[in-house]
Amino acid sequence: MASFLWHKLISFYCFFLSLAVLLCYGRAETSSVAAMYVFGDSLVDVGNNNYLSLSLIKADIPYNGVDYPSKKATGRFSNGKNAADFISEQLGLATAPPYLSQPDSVFVKGVSFASGGAGIFNTTDQSLLKGTIPLPHQVGYFSTVRQRLVKEMGSSAVQEHLSKSLFPVVIGNNDIINYFNTGSDMQKKYTPQQYVTLMVSNLKELLKGIYGLGARRFLLVGLPPIGCAPKQRYTSATNECNEEVNNWSKKFNEEVRQMLPELQVELKDFRYSYFDTYSVFVDFIENPAIYGFNETKAACCGLGKLRAKLPCTPLALYCSDRNSHVFWDVYHPTEAAARIFISKLFDGSGDYVSPITVKQLISM
């Protein structure tokens, strides 16, 4: 009996020792990330648009935030946390605050420039120019932040700091959406192929700009099948995906994946991980039960067919089973879907992340 108890004690000790080692190892992996500087659109906006008085693209009203810890709208286009929150959690960092909430701060611990409605071009819709922060303007804000960091820390310390930081870039969704909107000016100027190629060319130059300001480790997030969002399905009599929009989303992703290795050759110490959001999303649609979803077409919050006729406002209806929905509103994922996306990003698998995993990226 005594021998049995002794062996049990040893087993428990070994278990807790192993757990401690794993926890320490996890912290060691993430400790190499000094800060996170986020560029992008509403998928990672944590409240910047709340500070744009002329913006019509805001998530500062119920029912947004119904599942956020505060139970209040935070400017996130979600029922709770979004992808930016989950990336930060995986890295052991606090969520980077919205730049416009503290525009005079130094932001040593990181900041988010992401803005709902933002695109690669100076504006994806002229009527929204004053209501969003397009990627070129986000890069301009980062330049201002870097200048303040240099005053605070000194040039060499800032370069060391930024080289150890992570730079997620989540952009391009609005450029595609607005191109295919009825009456788009861009359709009159460019064929779809010309437009996508121009998107990628501009993105390349903007990434060079971010690199020139000190960034070295980039996380590029590809476009999902945008044509499968409730707003895109709404126009189909049978609620099917808009395959034309999907095809050009996929084409953009392909050209980005061809462009990134070119940057790696051109720019010393440029390192990146590319996340194949498109394939993950297709898996959600084809195998929803595996992920706990039973609704992949309709939004949780909205009105009308697929709850996509009208967006998520206080006049809308919202579902009680939010964890079973892929979409929160007409374009944005639920907290549950965003959490799974980011777990796929960090699970170490090469199925969705290339040419190196995020864990490999942050250890470099």
Image (cartoon, rainbow, N blue to C red):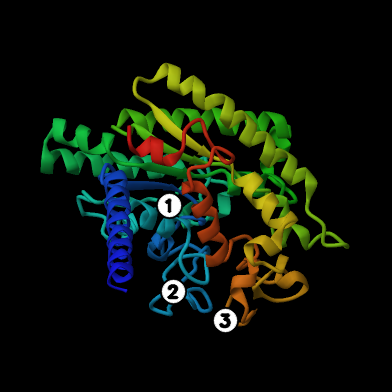
Q: Residue at x 41, y 53 (%)?
A: 87
Q: Which residue is mark 2?
A: 68
Kindly check if marks 2 and 3 are in contact, taking CB atoms under 8 A apart as contact: no
Residue 312, visible in the rendered structure:
no
Three-letter amino acid code of the residue under disc 1: Ala
Q: Between disc 2 and disc 1, whose residue precedes?
A: 2
Tell me the CA gap for discs 2 and 1.
19 Å
Is disc 2 placed on a helix, strand or loop? Answer: loop
Residue 146 position in % (x across, y down):
24, 40
Q: Which sits earlier in the primary sequence, circle 3 or circle 1?
A: 1
Q: Is residue 132 above or below residue 148?
A: below
Q: Which quadrant would residue 264 be assigned to in this image?
A: top left
Q: Which type of secondary structure does the marked residue at label 3 adopt?
A: loop
| Circle 3 residue | 314
Q: Amino acid at mark 2?
A: Tyr
> Mark 3 is on which residue type?
Pro
Please give the residue where the numbered disc 1 appears in the rendered image. 114
Whole-Å distance between the Cαs marked 2 and 3? Answer: 17 Å
Residue found 32% across the figure and 28% down from its top: 212
